[in-house]
Image: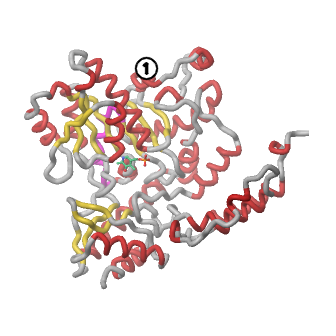
């Protein structure tokens, strides 16, 4: 007899799988209410007890009380922040990963799973134009990807500039870089050379000018470029900045957490060509590559550099490094040890649907952004702030204050029309729509725009 917690309960399995079937079959996924849901969660406290509550009852509570109090990031009406729109196959396979109890820490434990994850990474590296030897690991998100990559960049920079005191080393970065970059530099004890730009886009000329006018330019060890800023979808001059980094022996990190999805947009091929210069690159499958949370791909041009920096050493882990010469331990390439092979859901979905479907889904969001921009331009009460480069649209409602935008956003959620979140642009409150789900309709966009006409 197994311990009760390890005994298969066919009835509970059916209940759970039925719930998953219902959730997966929702077409479209409703937005739901998030914090607007009035629930006092009566009974939540009592569920955890010494004798336990029947699983079916806990599940019923989840379905009735907890699930509706969460805005569904995978709804086509979710246009705030950067949405998360996992494909049906990726969600299903996430269940397979969970039920298989997979541990993606090392080659010794799960060579098969690691091999499949690495195949997905290899595919992304190839699209980015990185050399054959490139490789890395799936981590929890862009924040962890940036931190892990910049740790390697810092250590390489320390060696290259051994005459500079470690606390004086800097990365050059534009002021439009993601907040996680500032967080990473803070943790690493590295300060930033903020490169001024005239149009929020970091170019080789801006970088060159900033370096030329800085008396301490020899303290700069690398550059962080953004492939698709989160707020406005702006792609830095990757080719120019990357080339300059090569010439000056600077670490070139590209943050493509969101905009890296444009690897699947043919019209961005030229713009993204500079990715091939990257020493490290991140793209979040949980953003624009339609995978479930939480999943970021972290790639290094020379994985060996990362392995030297990130491998954890301990007596009980030695066997992982003795096991086989071809051993690829995902734990050696970022700040983590135990990990779920989270890249498998992305891998399964990509294999199942094929590249063309990814291309049409990514392109659909870009097309929707352009169509939204056209609608905004033709609305008298609105002003487009800039032509969208990817799938984010920034615009203003003439005469509105920050409070007006907030109230509008909450009303749209209350009415279950859409979830939008205002943003700030050059100090001013503005409206922002982030498109990602290929099923977001132009009718919805028109309805949102109409709702600002009061
Ligand atoms: C979202 C985002 C991040 C952070 O990624 P998380 O997965 O949320 O940790 C970093 N950089 C950019 C450009 C992003 O859009």
- 436 falls in the magenta region: no
Residue at 39%, 22% in the rendered image: 305
Category of crowding for the residue at label 1, using alpha-carbon neighbours closer than 10 angstroms: few (below 14), some (14–19), many (at least 20): few
Vertical arrangement, residue 10 with respect to residue 68, above or below: above
Q: In which quarter of the image is the C terminus?
A: bottom left
Whether residue 244 sits left or right of residue 440 in the image: it is left
Q: In the rendered image, which quarter is residue 154 located in?
A: top left
Kindly tell me whether residue 17 is visible in this rendering: no
Q: Give the range drawn in magenta.
A: 267-280
Residue at 46%, 44% in the rendered image: 141
Residue 422, image x and y in percent? 33, 66
Q: In which quarter of the image is the N terminus?
A: top right
Vertical arrangement, residue 9 with respect to residue 313, above or below: below
Residue 326, image x and y in percent? 55, 20
- 275 falls in the magenta region: yes
Q: In the rendered image, which quarter is residue 204 located in?
A: top left
Kindly tell me whether residue 329 is visible in this rendering: yes
Vertical arrangement, residue 28 with respect to residue 269, above or below: below
Q: Is mark 1 on a helix, strand or loop?
A: helix
Residue 270, image x and y in percent? 27, 48
Residue 30, image x and y in percent? 55, 71
């Amino acid at each position: 007899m197994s311990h009760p917690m390890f005994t298969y309960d066919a009835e509970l399995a059916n209940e759970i799988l039925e719930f998953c079937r219902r959730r997966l079959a929702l077409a479209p996924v409703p937005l739901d209410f998030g914090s607007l849901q009035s629930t006092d969660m009566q009974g939540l406290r009592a569920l955890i007890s010494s004798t336990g509550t029947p699983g079916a009852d806990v599940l019923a509570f989840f379905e009735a009380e907890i699930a509706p109090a969460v805005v569904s990031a995978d709804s086509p009406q979710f246009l705030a922040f950067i949405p998360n729109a996992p494909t049906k196959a990726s969600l299903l396979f996430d269940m397979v990963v969970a039920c298989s109890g997979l541990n993606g820490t090392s080659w010794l434990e799960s060579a098969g799973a690691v091999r499949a994850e690495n195949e997905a990474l290899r595919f992304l590296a190839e699209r980015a134009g990185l050399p054959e030897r490139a490789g890395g690991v799936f981590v929890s998100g862009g924040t962890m990807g940036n931190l892990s990559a910049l740790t390697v960049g810092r250590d390489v920079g320390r060696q290259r500039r051994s005459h500079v005191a470690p606390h004086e080393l800097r990365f050059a970065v534009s002021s439009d870089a993601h907040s996680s970059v500032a967080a990473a530099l803070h943790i690493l004890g590295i300060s930033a050379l903020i490169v001024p730009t005239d149009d929020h886009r970091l170019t080789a000329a801006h970088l060159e000018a900033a370096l030329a006018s800085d008396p301490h330019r020899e303290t700069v060890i690398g550059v962080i470029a953004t492939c698709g800023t989160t707020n406005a979808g702006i792609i830095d001059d990757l080719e120019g900045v990357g080339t300059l980094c090569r010439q000056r022996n600077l670490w070139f990190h590209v943050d493509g957490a969101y905009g890296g999805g444009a690897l699947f947009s043919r019209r961005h091929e030229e713009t993204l060509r500079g990715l091939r210069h990257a020493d490290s690159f991140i793209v979040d499958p949980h953003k624009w590559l339609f995978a479930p949370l939480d999943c970021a791909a972290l790639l290094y041009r020379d994985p060996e550099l990362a392995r030297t920096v990130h491998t954890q050493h301990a007596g009980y882990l030695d066997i992982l490094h003795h096991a086989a010469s071809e051993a690829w331990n995902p734990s050696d390439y970022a700040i983590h040890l135990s990990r779920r092979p989270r890249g498998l859901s992305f891998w399964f979905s990509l294999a199942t649907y094929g590249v063309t479907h990814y291309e049409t889904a990514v392109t659909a969001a870009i097309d929707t952004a352009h169509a939204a921009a056209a609608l905004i331009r033709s609305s008298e009460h609105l002003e487009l702030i800039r032509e969208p480069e990817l799938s984010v649209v920034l615009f203003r409602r003439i005469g509105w204050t920050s409070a007006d935008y907030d109230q509008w956003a909450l009303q749209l959620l209350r009415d279950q029309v859409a979830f939008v979140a205002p943003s700030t642009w050059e100090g001013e409150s503005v409206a922002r729509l982030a498109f990602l789900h290929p099923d977001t309709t132009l009718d919805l966009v028109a309805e949102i725009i109409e709702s600002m006409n009061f």
